[in-house]
């Protein structure tokens, strides 16, 4: 690696470290003051808040790493441009694409780090963080969930859900058992599916069995559709179902295949599976955009750095909005999962190449 390459990489890493420390510190401080009351009210010792916040750090880093890389590239090239170092490099015969190769390597390293964080570290740490928050602070783990089989227990009621789709708020294969105070089964509901509407569940293909206390036998009735108020709502099921961020790529892929082999809709998880690969590559995309903006921005030396940072942040914000919009279209089955997740990367990569050609 040449002296110029080492210099640029060292400066990018230096500013990236400063940005990362600052953002993580601010995030943890805001989160601390927002949640400390919940720890105190729940009676959980404050010392338990320390591992909770420590476990959240990898997730925070994974979320801000792409923007941190972009900002560090913008700052480094902005300062170099203000000090006429870019002019000196071009005068010595180096093209903009020489600088792009250096930044692309930085972006590739950032993407690999982000993939490892998202695949190996974050699923473990975020699961431990959620266990402290939901189990000890909020005390909202009254159920057992293993993959897609969910068991819920409430006073006089035990429910079994084979599969829950969090996008459409739909349950597939529902069984609800009602018990009296002596734990005798007094009613059982079997439904093929259930959709949450308003403040109740609408069950489809329902077999409703009631215990006749006089005869001691069960009377069964069939309903094509039946409205029921159950002891849980979709928000409760979302807390129980294992979040996607707690699953690695291989685990999520196996989960998708199992859902599809059993005939369930896996569109949401297909989108999330593609995002496991596409999202880390945003580091390379933002590096291309940052380099093109830094080298192509016109203006006085004093104004150029502020303009570069403002334009870069604006484009990164536009990227997140567009990416989230495309992902939501994928969840809604308006776009195929592959198109929904990769469209933002493709479009903004083209934009980055355009800014680089303009700079050259």
Image (cartoon, helix red, strand yellow):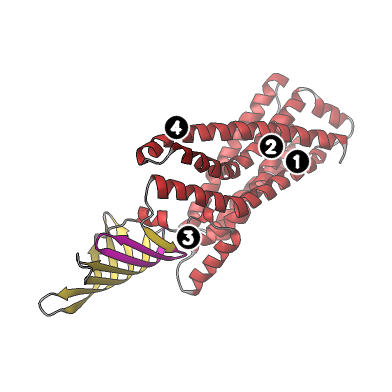
Q: Earlier in the sequence, mark 1 or mark 4?
A: 4
Identify the residue position indicated by label 4 in the image.
Answer: 33
Whether residue 142 is visible to the viewer of this picture, yes or no, is yes
Cβ–Cβ under 8 Å for marks 4 and 2: no
Distance from Cα at disc 1 to Cα at disc 3: 36 Å
Q: Nearer the viewer, mark 2 or mark 1?
A: 1
Answer few, some or many: residues within 10 Å of disc 3's Cα (few below 14, many 20 plus, some between 14 and 19): some
Q: Residue at x 45, y 69 (%)?
A: 264
Quarter in which the N terminus is drawn: top right
Identify the residue position indicated by label 1 in the image.
Answer: 103
The boundaries of the magenta stretch are: 146-166
Distance from Cα at disc 4 to Cα at disc 2: 34 Å
Q: Residue at x 57, y 35 (%)?
A: 24
Mark seen at residue 290:
2
Cβ–Cβ under 8 Å for marks 1 and 3: no
Q: Nearer the viewer, residue 183 or 62?
A: 183
Answer few, some or many: residues within 10 Å of disc 4's Cα (few below 14, many 20 plus, some between 14 and 19): few
Q: Earlier in the sequence, mark 4 or mark 2?
A: 4
Distance from Cα at disc 1 to Cα at disc 4: 37 Å
Q: Earlier in the sequence, mark 4 or mark 3?
A: 4
Q: Nearer the viewer, residue 70 or 182?
A: 182
Answer few, some or many: residues within 10 Å of disc 1's Cα (few below 14, many 20 plus, some between 14 and 19): many
Q: Could you say whether the residue bearing mark 2 is in a helix, strand or loop?
A: helix
Q: Could you say whether the residue bearing mark 3 is in a helix, strand or loop?
A: loop
Residue 116 lies, in percent from the top left, at: 65, 52
Left or right for 342, reference 187: right
Q: Is residue 154 magenta?
A: yes
Q: Compared with residue 296, is residue 107 higher up or lower down, i.e. above or below?
A: below
Quarter in which the C terminus is drawn: top right
Left or right for 73, reference 101: left
Q: Residue at x 72, y 28 (%)?
A: 78
Residue 156 lies, in percent from the top left, at: 24, 63
């Amino acid at each position: 690696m040449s002296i110029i390459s080492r210099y640029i990489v060292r400066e990018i890493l230096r500013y990236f470290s400063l940005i990362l420390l600052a953002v993580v510190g601010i995030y943890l401080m805001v989160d601390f003051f927002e949640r400390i009351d919940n720890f105190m009210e729940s009676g959980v010792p404050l010392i338990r808040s320390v591992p909770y916040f420590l476990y959240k750090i990898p997730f925070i880093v994974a979320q801000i790493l792409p923007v941190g890389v972009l900002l560090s590239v913008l700052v480094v090239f902005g300062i170099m441009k203000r000090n006429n170092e870019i002019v000196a490099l071009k005068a010595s015969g180096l093209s903009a694409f020489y600088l792009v190769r250096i930044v692309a390597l930085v972006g590739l390293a950032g993407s690999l780090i982000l993939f490892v964080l998202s695949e190996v570290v974050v699923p473990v740490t975020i699961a431990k963080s959620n266990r402290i928050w939901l189990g000890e602070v909020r005390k909202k783990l009254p159920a057992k969930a293993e993959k897609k089989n969910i068991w819920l227990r409430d006073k006089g009621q035990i429910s079994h859900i084979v599969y829950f789709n969090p996008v459409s708020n739909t349950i597939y294969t529902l069984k609800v058992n009602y018990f009296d105070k002596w734990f005798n089964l007094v009613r059982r509901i079997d439904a093929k599916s259930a959709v949450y509407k308003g403040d109740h569940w609408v069950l489809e293909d329902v077999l409703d069995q009631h215990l006749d206390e006089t005869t001691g036998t069960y009377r069964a009735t069939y309903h094509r559709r039946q409205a029921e108020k159950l002891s849980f709502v979709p928000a409760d099921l979302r807390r129980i179902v294992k979040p996607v961020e707690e699953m690695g790529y291989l685990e999520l892929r196996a989960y998708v295949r199992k859902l599809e082999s059993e005939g369930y809709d896996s569109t949401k998880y297909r989108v999330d599976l593609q995002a496991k690969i596409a999202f880390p590559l945003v580091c390379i995309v933002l590096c291309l955009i940052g380099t093109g903006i830094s080298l192509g921005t016109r203006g006085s030396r004093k104004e150029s750095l502020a303009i570069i940072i403002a334009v870069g942040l604006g484009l990164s914000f536009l990227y997140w909005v567009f990416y989230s919009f495309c992902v939501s279209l994928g969840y809604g089955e308006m776009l195929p999962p592959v198109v929904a997740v990769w469209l933002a990367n493709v479009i903004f990569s083209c934009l980055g190449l355009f800014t680089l050609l303009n700079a050259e």
